[in-house]
Structures are given as C-alpha cells and as structure tokens.
Image (cartoon, grey):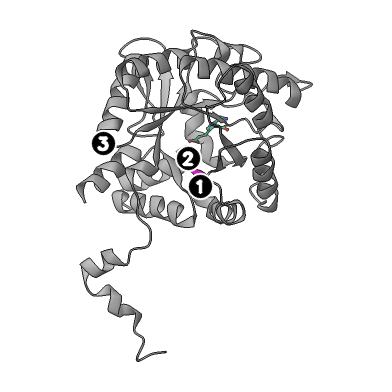
C-alpha cells in the first residue's frame, strides 16, 4: 500500500492514540541518580557548572536519597570527595572512607534503596589520574590492585553493585575474582565498558575535584572516533564477568549504545554525563530551549537507542514529570 491509501498521519490526530502507539516509555525504574559525598555535616556546596547539584555531606546525602526514593528513583551512584588524597588512591580503600561511611549511613535509614559505587582512583589521587603513576603514565597492572581493594572495601560497607570507571585492561576479571574470594559473589558489576576520553566530563571534574594535574586520559579512555574498538572493550568485559555494560557519554554515542545492545543483548547502561546535563541547563537558563522538553527528548532518545538504564543528573526532575502523567 502507498499513498493515498496509506497515510501515516492517521495515527497522529488523536492524543490518546498517539499515546497508544508510543514505542519508547521512560520509567523511574530506568534512572540511576549520581551523588557527590563530601566530609563534614550540613555541607551543601553548589557545583557551579551543574545547577541543582551539590557536594553533600553524609547527613544531606541521606536526605537526598530519601527524596529520590520518594519519587520512585531507587538507585543512586555514589562518588566520594575524600578528606585527603594520596599517590595511588589508597584512601578509597579504607573502612572509614567517605563513600564507605555514606553507604552505612544510607543503609541505616533507608531500606528500599540500591547503592551503586563508582570504583576509580581519580577522585582519590593527588595527581588526578585514574590509577598508579609509573614513568608519567598510569600503570595498568599496579592499578588493578587498588581497584580490587577498593571494590572489596565498598562491598564490605554494603554497596549493592560495583561500577568500575577506570578503563584499565583486565579490571573486571580482577575485581570479580577479589569479590568472589571475599564472599561477595552475589554483588554484580556494572562496567563502564566503552568509556570515551570525552570533553563532556568537564563539569564532573569540578564536582568531584578529579581533573588530571598533567596530561589527559587518552592512554586509557577511548578515542571518540572509534566504535569497533568499543565492541572489543564490551566483549572483554563480558568475558571477564561484567553483569551490565555501560556506554559513556550517551548523547554523542547513541550509535554505540545501539550497537552494544544489538551485538551483545546484555543489560546496557548509558551515562548521560555532566557536560550533557550542563548544556541543557545553560541553554534552558538563557531560554534558548524549552529545558524540560529537551531533557525528556534526550532521555527518551537514549532509551530508544537501546539503553536499559540511564545514569542521569536529571533523574529527579524527569521523575517529577513521569509521576505527573
Ligand atoms: C571517574 C569518572 C568520571 C566520570 C564518572 N566517573 C570522570 C572522568 O573519567 O574523568 C564522569 C561523569 C560525568 O561527567 O558526569 N573516572
């Protein structure tokens, strides 16, 4: 059949019908809400490049988690801003590390929450790189040791899922082994499998105080021009035991999300990163775009591309819109 028998507009004239034939539905179950935990009490430091986001002390992180759960967003991703840093990020592996304390405090007060912890060295090292430095570069195999220690320590504190974002080779296998040897075989790993060396992380580095003090991350994070290589990264992580694979950033990498979903048929997460969030906020502030509408369009596009889960700073605002429907 062709025009005039076929008229695609027929399904668009009525709003109920449009709703009925909608192919992609966002749900609060899709969202993971990132939070930045810092020392102190009643601390709420605004992150200037990420309006509405703050470095929060543990007491206020607990409050923010309650708010998230009340809106149906039951999963959070924690990042730590430690009291002090060291050469190889060992402060991230301590029983009383900032994230470890936050996990216990949250679990103490909220039962129906799922806590994911980022595992990486960059927030915890003096030089801001994602691992241990040898001869001016991150040493892959040495870094695996601290990543494994950090993961076990976070699981011990009560983390529900471990999310390594460092991009070292072999880290998923190493972390899986360490978790299993310590009795945490039930704790899943969500791997930042295809993580690009991206300009979109700028605002996050202000938020987490994690900008590298020299060089950049291009010896470990991926070249934005490559997608075949992303398939190899994902394949490796699956072989090593990843339970969920992530593509990061999301918006400039929708093709990668689509390929990963189609080629591996695994649960796929996408990280709608800080720079993507900040661009929407900035243009919204200037009233150059309808901020809420663009936010929902972006989140829908990420899901339509194939993401099952979306890590997003928009989580609570988007939840408000979804809950009103
Ligand atoms: C740590 C890490 C980064 C992000 C998440 N985990 C920054 C980086 O790799 O430099 C970025 C998240 C965002 O931009 O929202 N390695």
**Of marks 1 and 3, the one in the foreground:** 3
Label 3 lies in ligand 1 vicinity (Cβ under 8 Å): no
Residue displayed at 52% across by 41% down: 200
Q: Secondary structure under badge 2? A: loop
- Boundaries of the magenta span: 267-274
For mark 1, does the 10 Å Cα neighbourhood hold few (<14), some (14 to 19), or many (20 or more) residues?
Answer: many
- Does the rendering let one see residue 35? yes
Q: CA distance from mark 3 to mark 2?
A: 21 Å
For mark 3, does the 10 Å Cα neighbourhood hold few (<14), some (14 to 19), or many (20 or more) residues?
Answer: some
In this rendering, the answer to whether 74 lies above or below 111 is: below
Residue displayed at 48% across by 40% down: 273
Q: CA distance from mark 2 to mark 1?
A: 7 Å
Q: Quadrant of the N terminus?
A: bottom left
Q: Which residue is mark 1?
A: 250
Q: Which residue is mark 2?
A: 273
Q: Which residue is mark 3?
A: 71
Label 2 lies in ligand 1 vicinity (Cβ under 8 Å): yes
User: Do callouts 2 and 1 mark residues in contact (Cβ within 8 Å)?
Assistant: yes
Q: Secondary structure under badge 1? A: loop
- Please provide percent x and percent y for residue 48: 39, 30
Q: Main secondary structure of the magenta part?
A: strand
Q: Is residue 202 magenta?
A: no
Q: Is 102 on the left or on the right of 234, as rendered?
A: left
For mark 2, does the 10 Å Cα neighbourhood hold few (<14), some (14 to 19), or many (20 or more) residues?
Answer: many
Q: How many marks?
A: 3
Q: Quadrant of residue 315?
A: top left
């Amino acid at each position: 059949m062709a025009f005039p028998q076929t008229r695609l507009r027929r399904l668009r004239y009525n709003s109920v019908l449009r709703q009925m034939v909608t192919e992609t539905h966002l749900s609060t179950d899709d969202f993971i809400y990132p939070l930045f935990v810092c020392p102190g009490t009643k601390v709420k430091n605004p992150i200037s490049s990420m309006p509405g986001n703050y470095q929060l002390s543990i007491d206020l992180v607990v409050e923010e988690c309650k708010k998230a759960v009340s809106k149906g967003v039951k999963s959070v991703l924690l990042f730590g801003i430690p009291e002090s840093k060291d050469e190889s990020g060992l402060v991230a592996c301590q029983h009383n590390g900032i994230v470890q304390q936050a996990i216990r405090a949250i679990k103490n007060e909220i039962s129906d929450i799922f806590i994911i912890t980022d595992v990486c060295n960059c927030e915890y090292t003096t030089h801001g790189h994602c691992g241990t430095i040898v001869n001016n570069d991150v040493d892959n195999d040495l870094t695996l040791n601290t990543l494994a220690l950090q993961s076990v320590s976070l699981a011990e504190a009560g983390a529900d899922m471990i999310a390594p974002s460092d991009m070292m080779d072999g880290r998923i296998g190493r972390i899986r082994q360490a978790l299993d040897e310590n009795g945490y075989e039930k704790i899943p790993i969500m791997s930042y499998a295809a993580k690009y060396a991206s300009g979109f992380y700028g605002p996050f580095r202000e938020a987490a105080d994690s900008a590298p003090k020299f060089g950049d991350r291009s010896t470990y994070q991926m070249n934005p021009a490559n997608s075949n290589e992303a398939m190899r990264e994902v394949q490796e992580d699956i072989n090593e035991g990843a339970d969920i694979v992530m593509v990061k950033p999301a918006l400039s990498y929708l093709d990668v999300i689509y390929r990963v979903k189609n080629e591996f048929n695994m649960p796929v997460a996408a990280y709608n990163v800080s720079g993507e969030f900040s661009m929407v906020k900035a243009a919204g502030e200037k009233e150059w775009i309808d901020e809420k509408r663009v936010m929902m369009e972006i989140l829908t596009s990420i899901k339509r591309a194939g993401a099952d889960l979306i890590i997003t700073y928009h989580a609570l605002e988007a939840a408000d819109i979804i809950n009103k429907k």
